[in-house]
Image: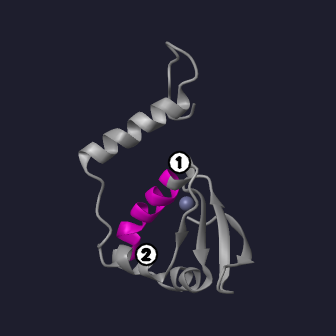
Amino acid sequence: MREDGVHSLGDSGEYIWILTCVRCGRFEVNGFALAHYENRSSYGLNRNRYLLSGRARNATLDGRNLRSNDEDFDAAEQGKIPEKTVEEKIHLMLGWVVRSSTKVGQQLTPDS
Ligand SMILES: [Zn+2]
């Protein structure tokens, strides 16, 4: 999930890591959550990590700023982050097509 990062201070003075990942995009994690994430490996977190990754990727594609905290990692670990419904997945896929398509008839691939 993590490739590189710089830190800054959040509104309440906490350390915020601004991370960039080729798969997840750009996202922020507060310092406590990042420390827990890096020092905690569990079956639940490893199994559900893709949900946090997807959340970060979708926020990046939508131009939103996503900041994850301890509760997000706890929710992932405990399987409390719901999977997208088929309808939500369709909307995400159509949004990708709209963002990626620049001219009529253009063939799109996941790398385009
Ligand atoms: Zn990643």
> Which of the labelled discs sits on residue 62, or is there none?
1
- Dividing the image into 4 quarters, which one contains the C terminus? top right
Queried on whether the Cβ of the residue with tag 1 lies below 8 angstroms from ligand 1, the answer reads: no
- Quarter of the image containing the N terminus? bottom right
Dot 1 alpha-carbon crowd within 10 angstroms: few under 14, some 14 to 19, many 20 or more: few
Instruction: Give the extent of the magenta segment.
Output: 45-58
| Residue 110 sits above or below residue 54 on the image | above
Tell me which colouring the rendered structure shows: one colour
Q: Position of residue 45 (x, y in %)?
A: 39, 75
Instruction: Ligand 1: give its quadrant.
Output: bottom right
Circle on res. 72? 2
Q: Circle 2 — which element?
A: helix
Q: x, y percentage for residue 102?
A: 58, 22
Chief SS of the magenta region: helix
Q: Nearer the viewer, residue 42 or 59?
A: 59
Circle 2: residue type? Asp
Q: Position of residue 82 (x, y in %)?
A: 29, 64
